[in-house]
Image: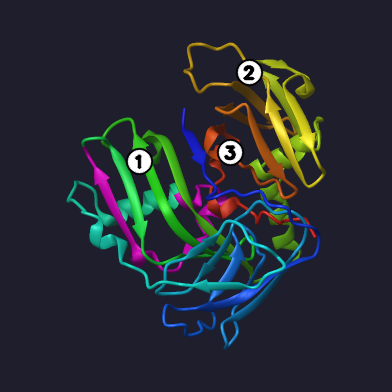
Amino acid sequence: MNLVKLFSLFILFSSISFAQVVKGKIVDEKNQPLPGANIYFDGTSIATIADKDGAFQLQYGGKINSILAVSFIGYQTQYIKDHDNGKELNIVLKEAVNILNEVVLKKDRFSRKQKLQLFREQFLGQTAVGRKAKIENEDDLYFDYDETTNTFKAYSDKPLIINNALLGYKINYELVDFEVKFFSTSISSSDVYRSFYLGLSRYEEIETNPKILKQRQKCYEGSQLQFFRNLVNNIWDKDNFLLFVGSFQENPNDYFKITGESETKQVFVTKQNKSLVGKKFVAEFNLLYKKKQQSKIIFETDTFFVDQFGNNSNIENMIFSGYIAQLKVADMVPLNYGIK
């Protein structure tokens, strides 16, 4: 079984009301403005750029659990974990240090062409959308394969620029971590038993037409994002997700307790008795979407928070397999998809 952990970097929960504005100025260490710097909420299309004086103003809706990221080419990205909307931010970016100088890339039996193919499959995905998406700066990727542990890793000092033609998005993705583990010394996706990636993403809409909008909706339906939105809003039926324990359909209210305000809710998971799985194990469920797409989710936490976007505070403590695990970066829509 190919288990995939999908990570979202740095989840935060802060008290933010509707129609909020975050504003400030971005400078370098010499207090010189950085015009054109990017300011965005991770995983969304909520973004802006700094003006000629380094100043910016970014408006957004209700509570959002995604980190505010500030980036500029040649400088270290800064992550704003908490901020006061009543005060302007003064953000100082430091020059970037080439992390690849610290990475020892050893020779192995696999070619760069083979490694690129594996990276595309495990990062963009092998669906029709994943195969069509293109990374414009693949030359910025570096790879390492450790044959002693059968582990493949990828690195990039520069953000990956992904042209996702079928969804009409350009994605700026800062790759923080990428790792694939194999059953044996192999470079084939069929031999992968665990794959995960970690990073920050900014979505830019580059095209919309009825076909693209339909494809976005298709990618959203049955996705991890829709699952968590449905979960906290108690939406379960044959046209959405159905919950199973083993092969038996169950009432989700017997296993999940939802509390909290409308914009950010806390989920409590009822622990199952399954001693053979390990100490972290809490519960395991099978999911069926519209009676055709089958997935499995294993919880290694008994509580987590979900915001109005469907962003999850503990995604690193959940393991997906089946249909949802097949959906990689190319099949993902922004966290603010469908929410105004």
**In the rendered image, which quarter is residue 210 located in?**
bottom right
Is 128 inside the magenta-drawn segment?
Answer: yes
Q: Is residue 18 left or right of residue 187?
A: right
Q: Are marks 3 and 2 in contact (CB under 8 Å)?
A: no
Is 219 inside the magenta-drawn segment?
Answer: no
| Residue ID at (17%, 51%) | 107
- Identify the element where label 2 is drawn: loop
Q: Position of residue 219 (x, y in %)?
A: 66, 49
Give the camera-side residue of 3 and 131. 3
From the viewer's perspective, is residue 147 above or below residue 247?
below
Return the residue at label 3. 314
Q: CA distance from mark 1 to mark 3?
A: 30 Å
Q: Position of residue 158 (x, y in %)?
A: 40, 67
The magenta stretch is: 123-147
**Which amino acid lies under the numbered mark 2 shown in the image of this protein?**
Lys
Return the residue at label 2. 271
**In the rendered image, which quarter is residue 156 located in?**
bottom left
Sequence-first tag of 2 and 1: 1
From the viewer's perspective, is residue 300 above or below residue 139?
above
- Identify the element where label 3 is drawn: loop
Q: Which mark is residue 188?
A: 1
Q: CA distance from mark 3 to mark 2?
A: 16 Å
**Which amino acid lies under the numbered mark 1 shown in the image of this protein?**
Ser
Q: Position of residue 125 (x, y in %)?
A: 50, 48
